[in-house]
Image (tube, coloured by chain):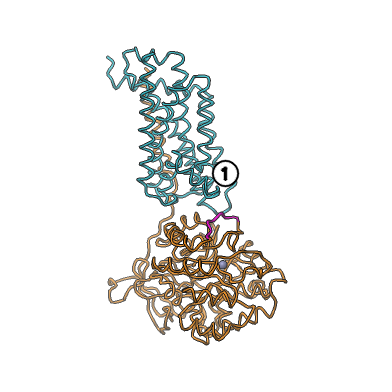
Amino acid sequence: MPSNRAKIYVLVLVSLAIFVIALLPEPQVRTTPSFVLNNITLYDGATWHENAKLTIFEGKVINSEQAPKNLPTVDGKGQYVIPGLIDAHTHSWGQALEQNLTFGVTSVLDMFTDINFMRANQHSRQQTTLQARLFTAGTLVTSKEGHGTQFGIRIPTIENAIDADEFIAKRLQEGSDYIKIVYDAEPEKQQFGMRFTSISQDVLKAVVKATHIRNKLAVVHVMDEISALHAIESGADGLVHSFGNSIMSTELLSLLAQREVFVIPTNSVLASIGQQQRGRKLLQYSPLAYKVSSHGKSGLMSSFPPNVGNEEYWKNALENTRLMHRNGITVLAGTDAPNAGTTHGISLHDELAILVEAGMTPTDAIHSATGAVSDMFKLPHVGKLLPGFHADMIMLNEDPRIDIKHTQTIVKILLSGIEINEAELNDK
Amino acid sequence: MYSLTRIYFLEAYFELVKTLRTPSFVLPSLLFPVMFYLFFGVLFSPPGASNTSAYLLATYCTFGVMGPALFSFGAEVAVEKDRNMLALKQISPMPIFAYFNAKFITSAVFALIIILSLFTVAATLADVRLSTQQWLATMAVLLFGTLPFCALGLWLGLTLKAQSAPAVVNLIYLPMSFLSGLWIPLQLFPEFLQKMAFALPPYHLAQLTLKVQGLDDGHHWFIHLGALVFITGFCSIFAYLAFAKQSEA
Ligand SMILES: [Zn+2]
C-alpha cells in the first residue's frame, strides 16, 4: 500500500528533522556565579582597599548589604584584585577577542573593524562568552583614499560637510558605539611614507557635530600637532593617538586640559614606529609570554620600516605622554594592536609599563586602563568593581603598586565572575 | 473510498517519489548547496572566523531551498504542461490544487533535506553554534521562505516552453542568488550592486534568515517579510492569469 509507505516516509522525515535538530550543538551557556571574595587587596577602578571583600551576585558586583545570606565564600588571601583591563585602541578580527581575554583584557574599544565582525560580536558583550567584550567605532570616518581605506575592506567615505548628518546616522544605525574620525591637516606631507588623502576640517567639524547631536562620542585619529589642534577646535572628545614628530606645544597642552579632551597615546605603536622593539623584549621577559600564539609572536617581532621613525620619534612621544599626564590631561591606555610590534592582550601590559616610564604611578596607569576608560567612554558596566558592574577582574600574585609589571603575574581571570579556563579558550 | 485529504496525500507522495527518481533533479539540488558551502563556508573561510561560517550557512541555506522550489514548479510544470499532463490533471476528478500542493510538498521535503545537511556540515566542520531555538527558527524561516519561489516558479512554468524552461530558470536562479549575496557576502560588492540587491527576493529571505542570528543588515524584519509576501502575491496573480489562459486553450 503506497499510503502506508508514505506514512512511514513522513514519520522518518519528521524524526530525522527532530533528531538532527536535537543533536546540533548549542553555544555554551554559562551560569553566572554568586560568591563573596574575601581577604583581598582590591583596586575598584578608583581606589585601593586593604583586607577588602567583593560580593558578586549573578556575575555582577553588588553591595554586600544587599547580598542574599549564605553566599559561598572564596578566600583570596595574598591576592591583588583589579578590574579586567580595557584596551582603549584596538582593531579586532579573527580571534582578537579571545586572545585579549587570555591576557586579562576583558573589554576592548575597537577603533575600526569590519561591520560583520561588529555585528557578530557586539551583542555578546552583555552575555558571558569566552571573549573580551567588544565596544567599537565600526566603520571609521575617512575620505576617499584616506587612511583606513587601505585594508581591503570596502567602506563608505565622506567628502562634503553636507553629507555628515546622513553619514553619521548611518554609522550609528549600523551599531557604532562611538565615532572615530581620521584627520590629517596636511595630507600632502605624506607622513610615514604613505600617501593618503584626508577629510577637510569643515567635514571634521560637521561630523563631530552630527555625532554630538546624537549623544555619542567623537574621537579623532591625528598624528601631529597641527591636526591635533584642528581636532580640538572642531570639538573632538578625544584623540586616539599621540605623536612623536614634535614635542607638544604649550598651546596644545593647555587646550587639551581646558576642553577636557582625553588622549589615547597608543605608546605601544609609537614605540614600534620609533624602532624600540618592545614586542621582542616582552617575549623575553614577560611571565605571560608563554601564552602568546605563534601568530601573536610574529606580530610582536615585526616592526615598522626604519624610514618611518627613529629613536628621536620615540623620545618625543614618551615626553608627550609625560607632558600630558603632568598637565592633568586624561591619558587612556591603548595599544593600536595588532599593528606591527604589538599583539592583542599582552601589549596592553607593556602599554601600562610605558605609562609608568612616562611618569605615571602604577595606580594611575591601571586607572588609565580601567576606571578612566569607563568614565571617559561612559561605559556603565565595565572598568570598575563597584555595584552594578560586571565582575570582570584579574587576580594578581604580586602588588602592582610596587611594580607595574606585576599586572603580568595573573593568577586568575574572571569574566562575569566566571573563571576563564585557558584550556577551553585555546581549544576554541 | 477516496477522501479529499487522501487524494492530496497520495498525489504528493507520487510526486515526491517521481522526483526522487529523477537524478538530474536530485543530485544538483542536494549536492550543490552542500558543496558550495563546504568550499566557501568551511575551507575558504578565514581561520577562527566562525561568524563567516554562520553567516554563509544562512545564505547557502537560502540558495539551497530556492532551487527545488524554482525547478519543481518552473521547469517541471512547463514540461508537464507541454506534454498535456496538466490538462489531464485538470479534467481528472482530482482538484488541480492537489497537483500544486504536491509540488509544494516535494520542494519543501527537498528544502528540509538540504537544510538538515547544511546544518550538519556547519555544526561538525565549521564549528557553528546556535541555540536550539535559533536552529529551529532558521529552519522555519527557510521552509516558509520557499513559498515566494514556488510562486515565482509556477508563474515561469506556466509561461515558459518546456524546452527553454530549465535554461531560463537557471538564468534567473543563479545570477539572482549571486547578486543577492548568497554566495559571497554582499559587503564585498560595489555599492550600486549592494543597493540593487534590495530589489531581489533572495536577498530578503537571506536577511530574514540572518536575523535569527543577528547577522542581518539591520533593516526591520517586516520590510523583508513584506517584500516576500508581495512577491508571493505578485507571482501568484500572474501564475493565475497564465493558468486561466492555459485552461481556455
Ligand atoms: Zn588604530
Indicate whether A255 appears above or below B183: below
Indicate whether B183 appears above or below A237: above
Residue A155 falls inside the magenta stretch: yes
Image quarter in which the N terminus of chain A is found: top left
Q: What stretch is highlighted in magenta?
A: A152-158
Quick one: B128 or A77, which is closer to the camera? B128
Q: Residue A372, how many percent across, how many down?
A: 45, 77
Quick one: A128 or A236, which is closer to the camera? A236
| Displayed-image quarter of ligand 1 | bottom right
In the displayed structure, does residue B155 sit left or right of residue A310? Answer: left
Q: Residue A249, how many percent across, how many down?
A: 58, 84
Q: Residue A148, how many percent across, how many down?
A: 58, 62
Number of marks in the rendered image: 1
Q: Residue A167, how many percent across, how many down?
A: 46, 59
The chain letter corresponding to cyan is B
Instruction: Tell me if residue A266 can be seen.
Output: yes
Which quadrant would residue A187 be assigned to in this image?
bottom right
Q: Main secondary structure of the magenta part?
A: loop
In the displayed structure, does residue A70 sit left or right of residue A252? Answer: left
As shown in the figure, which amino acid type bears the numbered disc 1? Phe
The chain letter corresponding to orange is A
Residue occupying the point 52% across, 74% down? A231
> Disc 1 marks which residue?
B40
Quick one: A34 or A306, which is closer to the camera? A306
Q: Within 8 Å of ligand 1, the CB of disc 1?
A: no
Please tell me whether mark 1 sits on a helix, a strand or a loop: helix
Quick one: B153 or A275, which is closer to the camera? B153
